[in-house]
């Protein structure tokens, strides 16, 4: 794992928020929400997650991680939804509208 990602994980707050995974071009490839940013984002890099092929591909494309702290889980949900609509990240499929 890159040193910059390790440093980011170490410094994430334990508060609600939204996280963005960016590729080497600075494009948002995934947006997620969390009740505890540090715990949630760190979970992507655990050994169990690396056994999942889809997650392994996503993780291999992460160049940097950004986060936005919010006041509550509901704020995180709303912000996540808005950011997914704005950036249309390749790896967010659940909230995409197929119409």
Image (cartoon, rainbow, N blue to C red):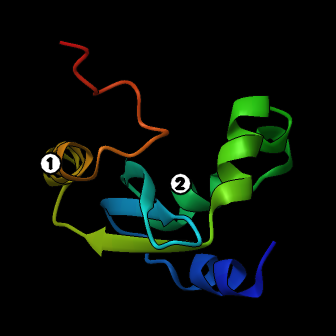
Q: Work out which residue is located at the far front of the displayed protein and give it.
A: 25
Task: Please tell me in which quadrant of the rendered image residue 17 appears.
Answer: bottom left
Q: Name the residue under label 2.
A: 40
Q: Residue 82, labelled with which disc?
A: 1
| Residue 58 on image: x %, y % | 65, 46
Q: What element carries label 2?
A: helix
Query: Where the C terminus falls, by quadrant?
Result: top left
Crowding around mark 2 (Cα neighbors within 10 Å: few <14, some 14 to 19, many 20+) is: some
Asked whether the residues under the numbered discs 2 and 1 touch, taking CB atoms below 8 Å apart as contact, a structural biologist would say no
Which one is in front, 8 or 94?
Answer: 94
Identity of the residue drawn at 37% across and 24% down: 94
Task: Please tell me in which quadrant of the rendered image residue 51 appears.
Answer: top right
- Vertical relation: 59 (above or below) 4: above
Identity of the residue drawn at 73% across and 43% down: 57
Which one is in front, 78 or 23?
Answer: 23
Horizontal relation, residue 35 to residue 87: left or right? right
Crowding around mark 1 (Cα neighbors within 10 Å: few <14, some 14 to 19, many 20+) is: few
Identity of the residue drawn at 70% across and 32% down: 54
Q: Residue 90, labelled with which disc?
A: none
| Residue 28 on image: x %, y % | 41, 60
| C-alpha span from label 2 to label 1 | 20 Å
Circle 2 or circle 1, nearest the eye: 1
| Residue 44 on image: x %, y % | 66, 51
Identity of the residue drawn at 43% across and 64% down: 27
Horizontal relation, residue 22 to residue 99: left or right? right
Q: Is mark 1 on a helix, strand or loop?
A: helix
- Vertical relation: 49 (above or below) 36: above
**Which sits earlier in the primary sequence, circle 2 or circle 1?**
2
Query: Where the N terminus falls, by quadrant?
Result: bottom right
């Amino acid at each position: 794992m890159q040193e910059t990602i390790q440093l980011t994980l170490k410094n994430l707050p334990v508060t609600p928020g939204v996280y963005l995974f960016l590729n080497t071009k600075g494009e948002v490839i995934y947006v997620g929400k969390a009740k505890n940013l540090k715990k949630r984002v760190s979970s992507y890099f655990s050994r169990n997650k690396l056994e999942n092929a889809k997650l392994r591909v996503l993780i291999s494309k992460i160049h940097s991680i950004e986060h936005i702290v919010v006041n509550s889980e509901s704020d995180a949900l709303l912000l996540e939804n808005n950011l997914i609509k704005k950036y249309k990240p390749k790896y967010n499929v659940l909230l995409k509208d197929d119409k």
